[in-house]
Each structure stands twice: as structure tokens, then as C-alpha cells.
Image (spheres, grey):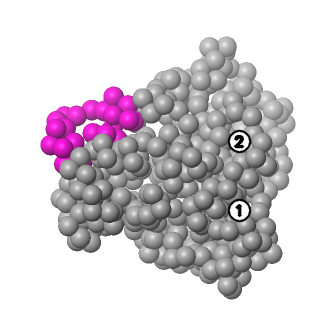
Amino acid sequence: MTSVAVLGGGWAGILFGLEYKLRKPNARVVILEKQRTVGGLLRSEKINGHLFDIGGSHVIFSRNKTILNRMLEIIDDVLEVPRKSFIALSRHFVPYPLENNLNALPEEDKIDALISFLEAWKLRPDDFIPKNFRDWIHNFFGNWIAEKYLVPYNLKIWKRPLENIDVDWIYTPGRLPIPDWRDVVRSAMGQLTIGYIEQSRFYYPRYGGIQRIFDCAMGMAYRYGVRYIKGYNVVSIKRVNDGWFINNEIYCKKIVSSIPLNELVKLMEAPEHIIRLAEQLDYNRVLVVGLAIRKPAPEQHWIYVPAPDIPFHRYAWISNYSPLNAPPGRSTLIVEVTIPPNQPVNAEKYVEETLQGLEELGVVKREEIIFVKAWLHEYGYPVHTTTSNRARSEVLHWLNEWGITPIGRWGCWQYWNMDKVYEDIIEKSSF
């Protein structure tokens, strides 16, 4: 009999298998992965010498030093890279984060941004609690930064009214920076300040793309005796005595799940009210468009694009993450577009609009493109609407009553980075 069955073999699933076996070497752990390829959103593909991180731009960083060290211990060859990320504002590339680089703005914009930021800081009470995401943006950053950057950017990525988005995920440690007004003033005066310090330098595999860290974790899990089954489609989960039957063929004492929460409850034949709650869990798909380009990349990593008329919210020169991500003299670019789940997907249309947007921004010309490929992921970003958050809490409570342990971004339906997923695994792998 299997001690623990882990549903889903992405980053969360493989980490749980590894950490659980480190604590309980004699336990029998099996990971069940629906796809025949491994890596999930951390998957990388190499095509004609160009390496693409097909789940979007991922880098290794954390303000939690213990977690950061754990991730770096997993991987066998890693680069430390000084961050060069920017916000594209009216054809100006302003270093990220904007509030720590106001001096890069034109003089009039710099003054307006600083005044509105200080007005917000002065008027915000010490016990201020934002009502929603838009409220948080305006009260922490001021109207200029809100209207020129943060509001249009977040409308583009979330595709929901910001008044309907909760603020719980913002207060997740390491998720978003809270600006210090002193640093904002210093930056406007031309002094160097570094915002979001834990991401000012990031780490990235020298070879293999971001999937390399997944592959190294998977290799460690194998060495400790974790069993990993690819191409295994879970269609039913039933309670039997003090254990569980999966597909009427795998019997286990405990189930840990990293698969999307809305899909898990259907597999368990949950009661109707739980199914209805799970249907309220909100999310966006993500389309990742990869371009191989016959010129070197500029000295940039990722660029945030708030312009409402451009379809994508971010693009990244991942050939600058590692020199092995593109052949000499060429570059690899990935672009991310979010798509709500109820919206039809015409991939060719999105790709064409992406290419038009890149041309309009002056990023690349058509004749410089060697080839283009796109990857669509059904689950890209959980969307923290107030309705979705209430539904998540009730569904997780129901799972807890049944003894199911949810893990990871989709198992917990939380907008978590790689490091926060690892923190969650450390906490939950000790049962």
C-alpha cells in the first residue's frame, strides 16, 4: 500500500515528494502526473538552438534566505544575475520598480509622480486597510503612478475590474514591494535606491532553462525512492475505510493534491454545494509566445507593458538570463498574454496581435524574426476576486475535513511564486 499519493507532478508535487521522503525515508510515495511531459509551468523547450521557458518568465529569488538556499542547493549549475527590468512608459524604459526610479522620468512627470506619491503617503492613516486592489494601489503609490502604470498594467494582466479583486495576495510576504517614502524622494533627486531588494539579483540555470531546477529536484526525488508516473489520468477518488482508492487501482493512506482545486472536487464526487463553490474559483489562462530573433538582445531582462492598446503585459529577453539560451549573435524572446477562461482562444490572432504590438513598441521588426511558436496553458494565474476567495476558503475547509492536503499554486488556488510554493511544501510535508 502506498503511504502518500501526490496528484500532479509539477513544481509543488515533486517538491512534496522529495521533502516528505527526506523526513520519512521508509514511506512509499507515488506522484501521479497527467501529462507525458514533465515540468508544468517550469517546462523549457529548445528549438534550433533557442531555448524557451514555455510557461512564462521564471527566475529564482526569495526574501526567505532558507528557502532561497534550498532552491540553490537543488540545482547543479546556476548563474547569479543582476536584475535589469523596466516599465515601458510612453516609449521610455523606466527601471523597475518605478517608485525607486522616478529620476528616469521626464522632469514634469517626475514632479507629478513624486507629489501624488507624497500626498497619498500624507493622507493615508496609520491603520489604513484597503477595500480592494484599486484602493490599495492609489493609497500606497499615489494617483500618478496608479493611473500611468499600476492600474492599466493590472487591468491588462487580470482582465477584471480592480474593485473586484481582493487584497489578501498583496500582503503575502515577498509578493509585492511596499515603497518607503524616503527612498522614493531620494530616487526623484537622482540618488540610487534599490526597490524589491530580494529580486534585485536573481538566479537562473546556466543550461536547460528554468526546467533545469525541476529536473534536478526530480532526480533527487528519484534517488530517495519517490515513484513518478507520467501520463496517468486520475478520473476518480474514493474513500475506502481509512484510506483512498484512486481509479480503483491505487490504494493509499493519504492524498496530497497540487492539481487545480476546481478539478479535484469533481474527481471526489463532492456534494453539489461544494461543486458550485469550486465553479466560482476564478483564473486566467496564459498564452506564451516565443520568438527566435536574428540579432542580440538589448541589455534587458523583463519589461512590463501597461499600454492598454498592446495585448501583452510582459515580455522577457530570456537569452539574457543565460548565454546558452540562444546561439551567438541571436536572441530568444518570450511574451505573455492572459486570457479569461470564458473567452474563446484564437491563438493565431493573439500571435499576430503580439507581433504587431512588439513592432509598435520598437522591440523587433518582422524581418528580424526567425520563427515564432506559441504555447497555451489553461491554468496560468489564479485571480483573487472577493467571490473566488470566499469560495476557495470554503472548498479548502471541506477538503481539510476529508483529510486531503492541498499544495502549490493551484492546489491552494493562491498566486504564489516558486519560493512561496516551497515554503508551503516545507510546512505541509511534516505531517
Question: Which residue does the image show at 45% across and 33% down from the upper left?
Answer: 162
Badge 1: residue crowd in 10 Å (few <14, some 14–19, many ≥20): many
Give above or below for 377 relative to 373.
Answer: above
- The percent position of residue 333, horizontal first and vertical second, equals 65, 67
> Which mark is drawn over residue 290?
1
Horizontal side of residue 105 vs 318, given as left or right: left
Q: Is residue 371 visible?
A: yes
Contact check, label 1 and label 2, Cβ < 8 Å = no
Give above or below for 334 relative to 2.
Answer: below
- The percent position of residue 71, horizontal first and vertical second, equals 52, 65
Identify the main secondary structure in magenta.
helix
> Dot 2 corresponds to which residue?
378
Q: Is residue 7 visible?
A: no
Which residue is situated farthest in the bottom direction here? Answer: 328
Question: Which residue does the image show at 60% across and 36% down from the upper left?
Answer: 283
Horizontal side of residue 400 vs 215, given as left or right: left
Residues rendered magenta in the picture: 117-139
Question: Which residue does the image show at 36% across and 44% down from the upper left?
Answer: 146
Horizontal side of residue 197 vs 351, given as left or right: left
- The percent position of residue 197, horizontal first and vertical second, equals 34, 64
